[in-house]
Amino acid sequence: MATTVPLTPPGIAAVLGRALRLRCPRCGRTPLFTGWFAMRDACPACGLRYEREQGYFVGAIYVNYALTSLLGLGGVILLDSVVGLSLVQQLALAIPIMLLAPLFFFRHARSLWLGIGYLAGSLDERAARRAARRSRT
């Protein structure tokens, strides 16, 4: 069951650091995953629900695609400029790497997407609280 929720939301650097360490974006106490592909439904420490609606993590696919594309494109450019391999040799190295990279980036892409969603949601909540306070005065 959920315990305590921090009174002050974490900053951007803290949330992104937790995302890179695959931890809960709100409290940072528990890991997001129970296995390589198995993600918890919610944080056991603070109760934050990870998947807010069906299809919530579709955006993580785009994050994963961007990371894989950067790795592939950067790798080909690096191989071309530093090593001087032929195009066939570059593709022989790049294709297997780009096929395996999405599997490697899967957890981090989901974690980054969750962190971005948490930041966006917490910013929306703070703005709504400020607006509610202003309307009371």
Image: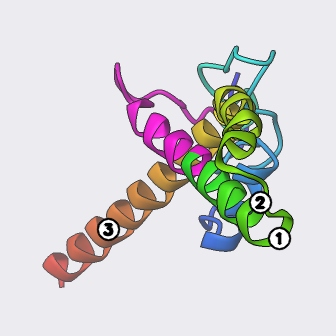
User: Amino acid under label 1?
Assistant: Val
The quarter of the displayed image where residue 3 is located:
top right
The quarter of the displayed image where residue 31 is located:
top right
**Mark 2: which secondary structure?**
helix
Tell me where the magenta segment starts and ends, as one range.
47-68
Q: Marks 1 and 2: in contact by CB < 8 Å?
A: yes
Q: Nearer the viewer, residue 123 or 55?
A: 55
10 Å crowding of disc 3: few (<14), some (14-19), many (20+): few
The quarter of the displayed image where residue 2 is located:
top right
The numbered mark at residue 129 is 3
The numbered mark at residue 82 is 1
Q: How many marks?
A: 3
The vertical placement of 107 against 62, above or below, is above
x%, y% of residue 11? 63, 72
Q: Nearer the viewer, residue 99 or 12?
A: 99
Q: Residue at x 49, y 60 (%)?
A: 119
Label 3 to label 1: alpha-carbon separation: 54 Å
The quarter in which the C terminus is drawn is bottom left
Residue 50 in magenta stretch: yes
Q: Residue at x 50, y 41 (%)?
A: 65
Residue ID for mark 2: 79
User: Amino acid under label 3?
Assistant: Arg
Marks 3, 1: nearer the viewer: 1
x%, y% of residue 128? 26, 66
